[in-house]
Structure formats: C-alpha cells, structure tokens
Amino acid sequence: MKKDILQQEKATVTMVGAGPGDPELITMKGMKAIQRADVILYDALASKELLEFVKPSCKLVYVGKRKGKKEFSQEEINQLIVFYATRYKQVVRLKGGDPYVFGRGHEELEYAMRRGISVDVIPGLSSALAAPASCGIPVTKRGVNESFWVITGMLSSGEMSKDIALAAQSSATVVILMGMTHIRSIMELFQQGRSSLEPAAVIQYATLPEQKTVRGTVSTICQLAEEQQVSSPAVIVIGNVVNESYLLEELSNQHVAIHRNR
C-alpha cells in the first residue's frame, strides 16, 4: 500500500488528443508524450499508426468504445487509469479528436486527481473542425455566418439533444457529432426551423483515405447518405458554409483545365 502511494506521487496521467483520424494530425507535444509513455490506454477512434512510435517496453491497453460495442464501461476505464498510475510513472490516455470535446476527458482526469494522481492534458484537433475543413467547408466565413455550434447528436441516454432544436432556430453553422442515429429527426427540425433548401453535408471517416462526403440539403441529405452508404462514425454539418466547398471545387477544376490547355 505504501509503495502504491509513493508511485502515485511520481506518476502522471497525460490525456492526449489523437486528432480526427489522420495520424499526422496529432500535435508534436502529443507525439512526444506517446514516445515516453510507460502505458497507453487507447480508444477505438485513435489511429493505431500512432502506437508504432511507442518505446519497446510500453504496455498497450485497448479500452475502445464504438456505437453498440463497449469493451469497458466508463467507470471501468476510470479505474484502469488509476490502476496503471499506481504501477507506472508515465501513463497516457489516448483519445480520438480532442478529449474535452464530447470525449469525457475531463471526467477521467477528475477521477484520477481525486485519488491523488498528477494529471496533464494535451489538446487534439477535434473532428468538429477537421471534418468540415477536410472537404473544403469553412465553419465560419465572413459574410456567410457569424458563429458555429458544436452539438452532440445523442445523449448518454440515447435520446437526441434538445439543443439541436435551439440550433435550428439560429443562423449559425451547426456541426453535429454522433448524430447519425437521429439524422432524420435532426433534418426535420431544420426544415421546420430554417428551410428545406438549407445546405447540409455528412462526412464519414474524416481525414482518412476512405473518407466519404455527401452534400445536399436538409430535405435530401438522408436519402443521399443512404444511397452512398454513409453511416457512423460521421460528422453532420448544416448551414450556408456547406455551399462554399462547391466554390473551391469549381476553382480547382478551372486550375486543372488551365494546366491541361498549356
């Protein structure tokens, strides 16, 4: 018991945001934490390629959670973090995206801190920003919108977030994470609150080679996503900024045509 207490005083749990999927989008500070880790507890959405950079003695512990499948409950993950922090000096909790954006990162660090363990956090690039950018959608653009909302599409209870109805009444860009289960209900709210012609997009596997992007309107996006077999994990974007991605495509095609004619 005394040994465990001494180890806790020396141990540090570092919460690392792995980014949206592409392993090259992790921060340099996050990569350094991975390289010095004695133990890494990693999620399903964290790129496995990042684990190739660990030192040979590093222990890898998979604690991933995906829709409909959980290896561990949240309470069990919290306990595992503390368990390894009493036995190793550098413990990394590697989470997809940013740990503080619907990632329960703060809950996990709070649990460790209440048990006398030192903690640190290294932010990551959230898919809420990276997914739209990866397909040419700016979450903000001067003259198009004034703000953006990031909302979870599904609460821990399985119900749809009530904030979505409020967002539908605004003129903001709305980015919805974990919303594919309720996508039809979400689009109905926006048809009522805005217009059936309001632009919308769904981005699956953002920043990865297998990325799929479907664009349409709130009245057509569900059918388009179904036809192109786009499902979770995906990010939903609603707002006039979606149309700005078409402009980039047009300009890109013009450049290609110019080079061909030279």
Image (tube, rainbow, N blue to C red):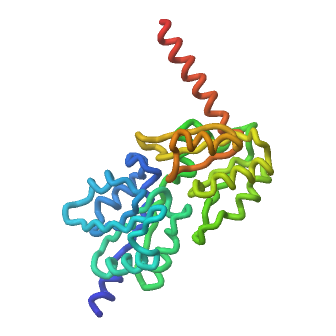
Classify residue 86 as left or right of residue 224: left
Q: Residue at x 46, y 41 (%)?
A: 211
Does residue 57 appear to the left or right of 24 in the view shown? left
Q: Quadrant of the N terminus?
A: bottom left
Q: Is residue 209 above or below residue 147?
A: above
Q: Position of residue 250 (x, y in %)?
A: 60, 23
Q: Residue furthest top?
A: 262
Residue most toward the left?
56
Please state the total of marks drawn on the protein image. 0
Where is residue 231 drawn, in percent x and y? 52, 49
- Farthest bottom residue in view: 1
Q: Quadrant of residue 60?
A: bottom left
Q: Nearer the viewer, residue 260 or 159?
A: 159
Would you place residue 253 above or below residue 171 in this image? above
Rendered image quadrant of residue 92: bottom left
x and y, in percent, of residue 248 in the image = 59, 28
Above or below, 117 relative to 48: below
User: Can residue 234 be seen in this snapshot?
Assistant: yes
Instruction: Using residue 59 as the reference point, say whether residue 196 is left or right of it.
Output: right
Q: Can residue 10 be seen by looking at this rendering?
A: no
Q: Residue at x 35, y 55 (%)?
A: 31
Q: Please give the name of the residue rendered at 47% of the width and 74% of the height, measured from the top-left corner.
A: 108
- Taking the spot 59% from the left edge, 22% from the top edge, the residue there is 251
- Residue 177 left/right relative to 62: right
Along the line of sight, which residue is nearer the eye, 62 or 36? 62
Vertical placement of residue 61 versus 31, above or below: below
